[in-house]
Structure formats: C-alpha cells, structure tokens
Image: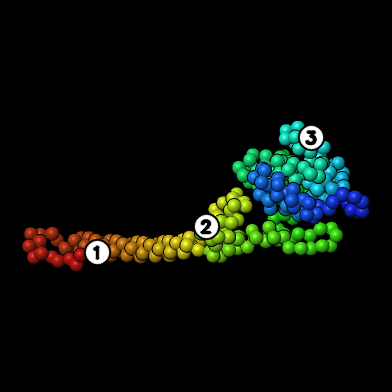
Amino acid sequence: MRLKQFLQKGGRKYTDPFYDKTDEIASKKTGVPLHILRSVRLLGERSNENQVSSANAKGVYQFIPSTRNNVLKKYGVDAWNPDQASLAAAYLLKESADRNNGDYYTAIREYHGGTDKSNWGRYNKEYIDRITNNNSLSNDYGNNYENPYLKEYTDIIKGMQNGVIDWTDGRTQELYQKSPDFVNTVMNTYKTEQEYIRDYKLEEERKVQEQNKKMVEEENKYIEEVLKQKQFEKQQVLSTVPLSKSVLSNDIKLNI
C-alpha cells in the first residue's frame, strides 16, 4: 500500500519548503512550538499531499474524515486543504496539550492514536519514538539531512545535563522564546552545575553527620556496658562482704 502511494503522481512531498512556511504561520497563530509541528510532519507522518491511508487519512498531516470534519466545524480550517493543513494540525495538537497541562509528548501520542490510551498500541509507540529518538530527518526517497530543530534541543539538554547551561545562558533564553514548555520541562528535570555542587556538599555533610552519629552511638553503648559491668561488680562485692558498722566505717571503696 505504501509503495503504491509512493508511486502516485502529483502533489507536494512532505519535505517541501512550502510546509516549512505554513508551519511557521500555524505556530505563531496557535502557540504550538514550531519543532513540534515539523517533527510530526517530518518524522511522524512522513506522508505526501496525495497519500491516502487505509483509514482514508489524507494530506501531509494525515487527517481521517471524522477528525477533519471536527476541526473544520470548530475552527473553520480544512485539514485536507494544503494551505490549511499545518494550522489544522496545530489546533489539534494545542487542544491535546491544553488538555494535558502543556504536555506535548502526550499530545503527539494522542494526535496519532486518539485520546483513549488503550488504543495506542505498538504503532503509536513506534510513532512517538521516531519523533523523540531521532536527531536527523529522513524521507522515503533516500534524502537525509540534519534536523536543526531536534539537534538544537538535544544540544541544550546535553548542556543542562553536564551543568554547563542554565537560565542565564543566551542559548536557553533564545530557545525559551521558541518553546517555553520544552525549556521549563528540561530545566525542571536536569540540574545546573551549581545544583550538582550544592547537592554533593549536602550529601557529604549528611555522610559525615551519619558517621558522627554512629560514633556517638557506639561510644554511648560502650559507656553503658562499662557502667553495667561496674554495677555488677559492686553487687558482687556487696553480696560477699557483711554490711556491719565497722565495715561501713572503713569506707569500702569500689572502683565505680
């Protein structure tokens, strides 16, 4: 089926720069991060304008008839119209992200598999993995080229992991303007260098405190055992010596 679609004539390819422009417009209008839209088109759907799936999904963003009709009715945007496809996809992704507290990972999964998670299955997992695990974009025609969007985010993440990028870094600020949700998620997930140093010092202090506490406990235990032994020795002496006035007056000294 895919080969037959691939060989069909007419229509733009999903890698056509035309969609880069419509994605930009849709991103600005809806607030959906540009890299999300492009990743869905270039890594997720990978479908040309003229491709029709077995579920009758059409266009580069592969809208099935019912979803197309819902978006058309709600927003007046036709997903099967190439000029409006990016905007239709953006509206759909935004709805899902808003419903999931700004979580675009879930939004992408819902875009592909619907809101019922029990229907997601293996193909939905493969879909999201293509988007999140790839740093390069490729198409069915053998053309491979760098994905500047995903690469940029990957570099930022690595920088945050290594503690060399934080909020004061110009790259983070620039990236925040493009995708605040992404940056907030990453910054809440990975520690800055200062945080690593702080946590390391706190952990070292905790270890010292634990060690000191253990030493004090062992010392107190030893003292308690010595006192018990001395008390026992005292009782032994008292049990063998007559407690007469003369004995008491001699002040029997016990080493206690």
Can you tell which quarter of the image residue 242 is in? bottom left
* Position of residue 249 measured from the top left corner of the image (x, y, whole percent): 7, 62
For the residues labelled 3 and 1, the Cα–Cα distance comes to: 92 Å
At x 58%, y 63%, the residue is 159
Cα separation, mark 2 vs mark 1, equals 64 Å
Image check: 123 left or right of 157? right
**Residue found 76% across the figure and 63% down from its top:** 145
The kind of residue on which mark 1 rests is Lys
- Identify the disc placed on residue 167: 2
Location of residue 130 by image quarter: bottom right
Q: Earlier in the sequence, mark 3 or mark 1?
A: 3
Name the residue: 70% across, 45% down. 26
The quadrant of the image that shows the C terminus is bottom left
Q: Which mark is residue 230?
A: 1
SS class, disc 3: helix
Q: How is the image coloured?
A: rainbow
Mark 2 touching mark 1, by CB under 8 A?
A: no
Mark 3: give few (<14), some (14-19) or many (20+) Cα within 10 Å.
Answer: some
Is mark 3 in CB contact (under 8 Å) with mark 1? no
Residue that sits furthest to the top in the current view: 73
Disc on the earlier residue, 3 or 2: 3
